[in-house]
Amino acid sequence: MQQNVPDFTALLRSAERSAAHLEMRDSYMDDPVFTAWRDGRTGELPEEYQEWSGLVKETVGRGVTLRRARIVSEPVTDYIRWEHAITTEHNIAAGEQVRWLPRRLASDIALPGNDLWLIDDRRVMFHWFTGDGDWAGHEFNDDPAVVKMVTTAFETVWERAIPHEQYTV
């Protein structure tokens, strides 16, 4: 059942046990941090990245398990290479668990059509992107059949995926 989409920070703060993020694109919107990295310029992550880290630390500190699975094409795009490069200092340092699944190993998994967040195996927030990777919107869904499909897909991806520390790009 589609409902009003809560503020994402409120959604993550509502998690009691688990939050899982499934990413399935090989590139996303043009990010200035990515552009700087691609151009050989590195530096401290901007404020919005630090705010995310704070939210993750707060969430994990409440005992919530936060997992992120990325399904990627190989060879990886520059965008994925960048995500991999910042994952340790950004995602894992904040408390996320991150795994990578080469797309060729996902062929027999029934996957949702969009990236998503799954909260406590009860609520899903789907993210929509344009073909160019720009943000196009989102939808909140708590229909039990949809949640079950998403949970099954995420758990299958998670079981097959390679832990960040072992995945090389």
Image (tube, rainbow, N blue to C red):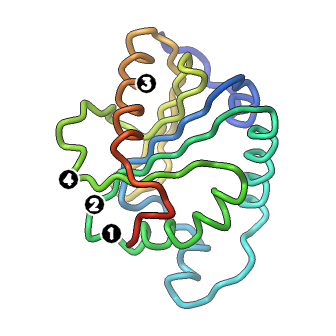
Relative to residue 58, is residue 113 drawn left or right?
left
- Real-space Cα separation, disc 3 to disc 1, in angstroms: 26 Å
- Residue lying at the far bottom in this picture: please name it: 40
Badge 1, how many Cα within 10 Å: few under 14, some, many 20+? some
- Real-space Cα separation, disc 4 to disc 3, in angstroms: 21 Å
Badge 2, how many Cα within 10 Å: few under 14, some, many 20+? some
Q: Position of residue 65 (x, y in %)?
A: 65, 35
* Residue behind mark 3: 151
Helix, strand or loop under label 4: helix
**Residue at position x 35%, y 70% in the image:** 77
Position of residue 59 relative to residue 149, above or below, is below
- Of labels 4 and 1, the one closer to you: 4
Q: Are the residues flagged by discs 3 and 1 in contact, CB closer than 8 Å?
A: no
- Of labels 2 and 4, the one closer to you: 4
* Residue behind mark 2: 73
Quadrant in the rendering for residue 51? bottom right
Relative to residue 167, is residue 118 drawn left or right?
right
* Residue behind mark 4: 104
